[in-house]
Amino acid sequence: MLRVMNPEAARLFFGCSICFLLGGAAGVFGVRTLYGEVDRVVPETRKTLVCPPPPPCPACPPPVDCGDASVLPSSPTTDPDVEAEVLDPEAPALPGLPASVLPYAHEAVREVLEPCLAEAPPDFPGVALLQLTVTATGGEGFISEVIVLQATGGAEAAASCLEEAARTARFPWAGGDGRLTFKLPVSVGGS
């Protein structure tokens, strides 16, 4: 059985259909006005993504220009301890230490650096990069050489204190004798 639509519903359906068609036409006109011919857009070819280089490390020293003759040392070091090791061919060379010495060295150095870190201004933060040489002989490990490679901010004022304090670090070492050089960043000041 066929049902006939009531005249008010037919007018409402016809009015909505006309509005829907006019809205679609207005939308197409608007898109073409704003963006031009949509049908003629050429898809962009695929590009290979290239990641930018990472930002520079704030605690790392800048690289040394090997071509600059003023940077290279003109003569061997004048430290008598170093000269004795270099010039004495019969002196036994110390072997390297295993990486398991690093936690002991880190803890010992951090303990002796606490007074320097406490004296640093809290509102002027900075970072110091220390190069430390650990030497172990006779069941004890100690810091035999300290170089402040770079210091920024509040760490510049504390650099000499950090260097002197790090030389006093000592720790028990049951392993064999040897030497190991490593770098340790130290944050100074700030929260």
Image (tube, helix red, strand yellow):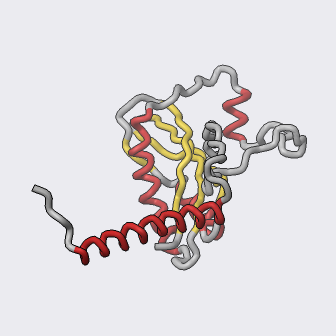
104 left or right of 39? Answer: left
Q: Quadrant of the N terminus?
A: bottom left
The residue that appears at 54% across and 68% down in the rendered structure is 26
Viewer-nearest residue: 12 or 66 = 12
| Image location (x, y in percent) of residue 147 | 64, 50
Question: Hey, which quadrant is residue 34 in on the image?
Answer: bottom right
| Image location (x, y in percent) of residue 115 | 48, 69
Q: Among all residues in the image, which is located at the extreme left?
A: 1
Q: Among all residues in the image, which is located at the extreme top?
A: 90
The residue that appears at 53% across and 36% down in the rendered structure is 180
36 left or right of 72? Answer: left
Viewer-nearest residue: 136 or 126 = 126
Viewer-nearest residue: 22 or 102 = 22
Number of numbered discs overlaid on the protein picture: 0
Question: Hey, which quadrant is residue 185 in on the image?
Answer: bottom right
The residue that appears at 65% across and 47% down in the rendered structure is 41
Question: Hey, which quadrant is residue 161 in on the image?
Answer: bottom right
| Image location (x, y in percent) of residue 70 | 89, 45
Q: Among all residues in the image, which is located at the extreme right?
A: 69
Q: Is residue 191 above or below residue 133?
A: below
The residue that appears at 66% across and 46% down in the rendered structure is 40
4 left or right of 81? Answer: left
| Image location (x, y in percent) of residue 107 | 40, 52
